[in-house]
Amino acid sequence: IQAAAVEKWGDCVEETVLEKIYSLTQNHPYYINLLCSRAWLQQVRPAIEEVLSIWDMYIEEESSRLSNELLSLSTNQRRTCRPA
């Protein structure tokens, strides 16, 4: 991550920002990549606030997508998705 940050912005990402990325993604490679790829679209190094904003937007998008997906299921399919 730091090598990519130096290449993009000429400086490392602050350690507190890295810790927040790892915490939000629970160190899962897919989500680290997703979050960082969105952060790397920014013109300046992301601060914690930007990382949180990007993550919140992703969660909102995913929630909306999953809601739409569930709504498109038949009644019987929805019944099988319900927790016991």
Image (cartoon, rainbow, N blue to C red):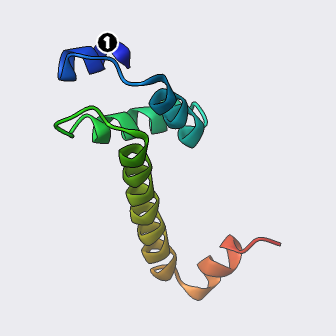
In the image, taking residue 81 as reference, residue 7 lies left or right, namely left
Amino acid type of the residue tagged 1 in the rendering: Ala
User: SS class of the residue under badge 1?
Assistant: helix
Q: Residue 6, percent across and down?
A: 25, 15
In the image, taking residue 27 as reference, residue 17 lies left or right, namely left
Given residues 76 and 26, the one toward you in this image is 26
The residue at the point 42 percent across, 71 percent down is 64
**Crowd class of label 1 (few under 14; some 14 to 19; many from 20; radius 10 Å):** few
Vertical position of residue 8 compared to residue 59: above or below: above
Residue lying at the far right of the rendered structure: 84
Q: Residue 76, percent across and down?
A: 63, 83
Which of the 4 image quadrants contains residue 3? top left
Which of the 4 image quadrants contains residue 36? top left
The residue at the point 43 percent across, 65 percent down is 60
Image quarter where the N terminus lies is: top left
Q: Name the residue under label 1.
A: 3
In the image, taking residue 30 as reference, residue 42 lies left or right, namely left
Image quarter where the C terminus lies is: bottom right
Given residues 74 and 14, the one toward you in this image is 14
Given residues 15 and 4, the one toward you in this image is 15
Q: Residue 8, percent across and down?
A: 19, 22
Vertical position of residue 51 compared to residue 37: above or below: below
Vertical position of residue 70 compared to residue 40: above or below: below
Residue lying at the far top of the rendered structure: 3
Residue lying at the far bottom of the rendered structure: 75
